[in-house]
Every structure is written in C-alpha cells, then in structure tokens.
Image (cartoon, helix red, strand yellow):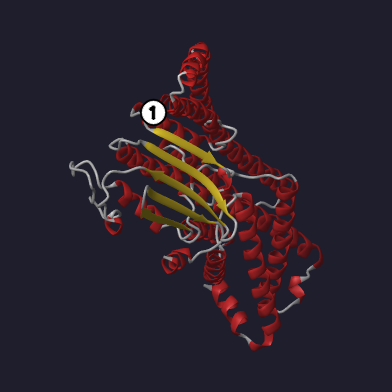
Amino acid sequence: MGFQNEMYKIMTSNNHIMLNVTFLIFLLTLVVMVIKFMINVFEMKINNKEKVIFLVSTFISVLTARLMVPIPILYRVICTIIITILVFFILKQNIEKSIISSSITNTILLIGEVLFSKILRFINSQNNIFNTLNSNLNFIIFSLIILFSLIVLIAIVNFIFKKFNLKINIRNNLSSKERNIIIFKSIFCMCIIFLTALELFYFKNYMLTVLVIGSIIVLESYCIKDISNINKIEESNIKIEALKEHVKNLNIMYDDIRSFKHDFSNIVQALGGYIVTENIEGLKEMYARLLVEIKQVNNMELLNPEIINNPAIYNILNSKYCKADSYNINMNIEVLIDLNELNINTLDLCRILGILLDNAIEAAKECDKKEISVRFIKDFKVDRNLIIVENTYKNLDVDISKIFDKEYTSKSEKKSHGLGLWRVKKILDRNTNLNLYSYKGNRFVQQLEVYNSMSNIKIEAEQKV
C-alpha cells in the first residue's frame, strides 16, 4: 500500500500542484494519442459522441488504475482488460477487434514502459539524480518522464503506421472458428508477453533486457501477421466464391446472347411482317417482349464484382437475383456508390439486405407484374447512403406500423414468418447511424438510410416523417 499512499499524498498536496496538473495533462495526451492510434490502425468507424465518451471513460479508468495498482505489469494488464471492455461496449466493435486493438496498443506501451524504466534506472545508478530529490517527488517525476516518453513512442509508432499505410483490418463476418482462433492466439501471445515483461524488472543484464524486448516485438509481429493471414485467407475465399458466381452469370449471359443472335433473323422477319401488314398492336407487343429480354441481359451485366465491389454483398445480390429469376421476377440492380465505404458492419448489412430482398421476392411473386428494384445511391445533401428496395405487391392492406413487430406477417402461414423485419429492427436499435423508412404506393418501398457522421438520425428521421 506504500505506493498508493505516496501517490495519494502527491496528488492531494498543495505543494505539487504544477506537477499534478502536468501529470494529468500528460496522461490525457497519452490517452488521446492511443485512441487516435487505435481508430486509425484498426479502421474503427465511430462518431464524435462515441469518441468523447470513450475518451472520458478511458481517462478516468486509466487514472484510477494508475493510482490504485502499484505493480506496472499488473496495471498494464488491468488497462488492457478495461480498454477491451470500453471498445466493445462504447465503440461497438466486435469482440475480436476489441481484444486485439487493446492488446497490441497496451503491448506497445508495456514495451516502452519497461524500456524507459530500465534506461532511467541505469541513468540514476550512474548519476544518483533521483536520490538527491525528495522521496515524494521521485514518484511523480519518474512517472512524468515515463509518460512523456510513452507519448513520444506512440507518436513515432503512429507516424510509421501512417507513413507506410499499415492497417490491421479484421472483417466483421468472420466464422465462429476463425473468431475463436484469433481470440485464443491473441490472449495466448499477450500472456507470454506480459509474463516475459514481468521478468524484465528483475534483470540486471541490460543486453539480456534488449534481447527479451526484441523477442517480445518478434512475437507480437508474428501474432499480428498470423491474424492478418487468417483474415486474408478468408477474404480470398469470399472473393473466389464471388468470382465463381460471376463466371456462372457470364455463362448464362453468353448463352442468352447466343440465343438472341441465333433468333435475330427470325425476329427481324417477324417485325417486318408486322410492319408490312401495318399491325401496330402486334409490333408493340413484340417490341415489349424484346425489351424484357434485353433488360434481363443488361441486369446480368450489372452483377459484376467490379461494380458490386464488396464480395459478401455481391454474393447476397447474386443469390437473390437467381432466386427472383426462378419465379420469373424481373430484378433490376443499380449500384452508384463504393460499397466498401458504407458506414455499416458488413455482416449487419448482409442480414438486412437478405431479409428485405426475401420479403420483396415473396411479395412480387404473387403479382401479375413481377418486379423488384434495388438501388445503392448517395444522398449528398444529408451525408448519407441509401439502399432502396422496391417491389410490386398484392396485399394493399399491409400495416406499415406493425411490420417490425415480432411474428407479424401478412402471409397465411404464421409459424415460419414474421421474424425477418423484427430481426432487422434489433440491428437498427444497436446502430445509431441507421434508419429504415418504409412506405407503400404503387410499389412497396424499404429505404435503408446509412448516415456517415450523425448520431441522432433516428430522432431527425421521425421529425422528417
């Protein structure tokens, strides 16, 4: 308890006000730089409100832990656990990204803390700097030097990552097996690193200290590389599946074009017959049928991985297109944005889009005019992206106000329906930048609104309506 008592005396003493203020400023600066590093390197998409809450919570938690925990290694372990929890609950990142971002950041700080502590102790052993000061001042001055050194270290690391555009990107739609592997390896590596660092405090051989720190850096690099490889392998598998689907679409489109080319002369002769006999109605009917066939070929061209540049979304759209085609539903797809820049978890978007398209297909297949339209567009006025699903529908009495209720459905079969939009509502509730606006007219419309920076969009959306 001696450490806590000394720190408490220093923090409450009127004789060291400037040192205390400097300590708090340094600690706050370090927390700000660490948060900036985590957000940039791990590509966390968060709004300003979440940043502020996370900053205040982290600062208070770290300061409390610093005053209460005397052992540096134990203090850093507690900080890792605290920041992991805060990233998960406040920044709403998945559990694996929360663990990895907190672990890597605190490992960098741990290495710096051990290294700078050793350097200071070596300098002090040669010059007796701290021994000439008041014992109370030793704590705060030592802490200030360490904090300042960590600020410089984080600034250098952040500069290096930014200079070489280094990112640690973890996909949101990892399988359970991949997620468990990443979490296990991260925790295992962190345990080894913390235990090794604990021994460093008892080493008097400085060359051995350097070797151990080098080993820690190598182990951490291996952990990061291994996690990145798992991520890249799964991304490659998704892209391969997307390319397989695209090749299948190209084969279908090629067969349609060959068939159209084969029948071209017959089509021209048939059109000529209508023209010669001045049968305008027959000419209009054939023209309408030709437009449908041409539109189907054009739609297949839009199912292109270069246009739909997110493999997960591509597979969703492709599978739903094939499903709609099996019911003779004309499905038009229009993508006018970069899908990788959408401010939404990819897994959440795939779930929402899949449910909306399934509902649209179920409704359209009952109509005489079977049509579905899917559009991805940018709304520059409000800084948001819109995903609009429109479909023809037969049940004009559907109650818009109840469609999100659990087990509400307009279908006769109640047991297997009524949960889709209820699940969508749960996803919307945990994402402050999402809103789903539904309305009906000539077509039933579901408009998913993905805001880029606004945290209070649901209130604004209600006021707009």
Q: Residue at x 58, y 53 (%)?
A: 198
Q: Residue at x 66, y 51 (%)?
A: 203
Query: Label 1: which residue?
Result: 325
Q: Is residue 57 above or below residue 387?
A: below
Q: Residue at x 56, y 70 (%)?
A: 63
- Which of 267/388 is in front? 267
Q: Position of residue 122 (x, y in %)?
A: 76, 59
Q: Is residue 463 above or below residue 165?
A: below
- Where residue 383 sits, quadrant-wise, is bottom right
In the structure shown, which secondary structural element does the residue marked by tag 1 occupy?
A: helix
Residue 202 visible, this angle:
no
Residue 79 visible, this angle:
yes
- Where residue 431 sits, quadrant-wise, is bottom left
- Left or right of 249 in this view: 119: right
Q: Residue at x 42, y 45 (%)?
A: 389
Q: Position of residue 179 (x, y in %)?
A: 45, 40
The quarter of the picture where the C terminus appears is bottom left
Q: Position of residue 265 (x, y in %)?
A: 52, 12
